[in-house]
Image (cartoon, rainbow, N blue to C red):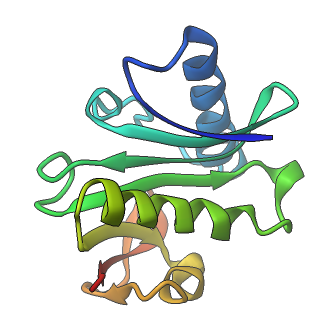
Amino acid sequence: MEWKLKTFDELTGHELYRILQARVHVFMLEQNCLYPELDGKDQASRHLFLEADGEIAAYCRILPPGVSYPEVSIGRVLVKETYRGQGLAQELMKRALACLKEEWGETAIKIQAQHYLHKFYSSFGFQDVSDVYLEDNIPHVDMILSQP
């Protein structure tokens, strides 16, 4: 298993295909949610992922300021079902937050979290900045982390 952090242009065709395949599987098929997965934000993002046995085990995209929010953002956070329960989500978030702080110098990070994951994101210090609302018929909450 190998963690990788790449810009869109650095991704190989096979990596991009596997990333999109994982995102569609988790966010559209598992959650039975039809929405525009290809939203035009991938090209501006960095992509953090763990490859295992030729597939994407864990993934998130890191969006620079001004793409989704005035702040930097982390989105499309996923761990493939067969790899859940191994601490990969925690490792993924730790790596993403370290990248934003150490490489980008960013201290304010905004996310749009699915509400059922509120406790998970709160464990990293994220705090609510909105009420719970429906996005694609799934309860969400906006959260911000201010790192020192």
Which percent across, then down, holds residue 75?
Answer: 42, 54
Most foreground residue, 120 or 31: 120
Is 7 rendered above or below residue 86?
A: above
Please state if 75 lies on the left or on the right of 23 as rendered. left
User: Which picture quadrant has residue 37?
Assistant: top left
Please state if 17 lies on the left or on the right of 124 as rendered. right
The answer, for residue 35, to whether it is visible in the render is: no
User: Which picture quadrant has residue 130?
Assistant: bottom left
User: Which picture quadrant has residue 132?
Assistant: bottom left
Most foreground residue, 60 or 28: 60
Please state if 26 lies on the left or on the right of 38 as rendered. right
Is 94 rendered above or below residue 66?
A: below
Is 108 rendered above or below residue 131?
A: above
Image point (85%, 65%), residue name:
86
Q: Quadrant of the N terminus?
A: top right
In the displayed orientation, state which residue is furthest to the front. Answer: 102
The answer, for residue 104, to whether it is visible in the render is: yes
Image point (32%, 66%), residue name:
101
Which percent across, then down, holds residue 12?
Answer: 54, 13
Which percent across, then down, holds residue 63?
Answer: 29, 48
Image point (43%, 88%), residue name:
125
Q: Quadrant of the C terminus?
A: bottom left
Is 33 rendered above or below residue 53?
A: below
Most foreground residue, 38 or 121: 121
> Number of labelled discs?
0
Image point (61%, 35%), residue name:
24
Please state if 78 lies on the left or on the right of 133 as rendered. right
Most foreground residue, 34 or 66: 66
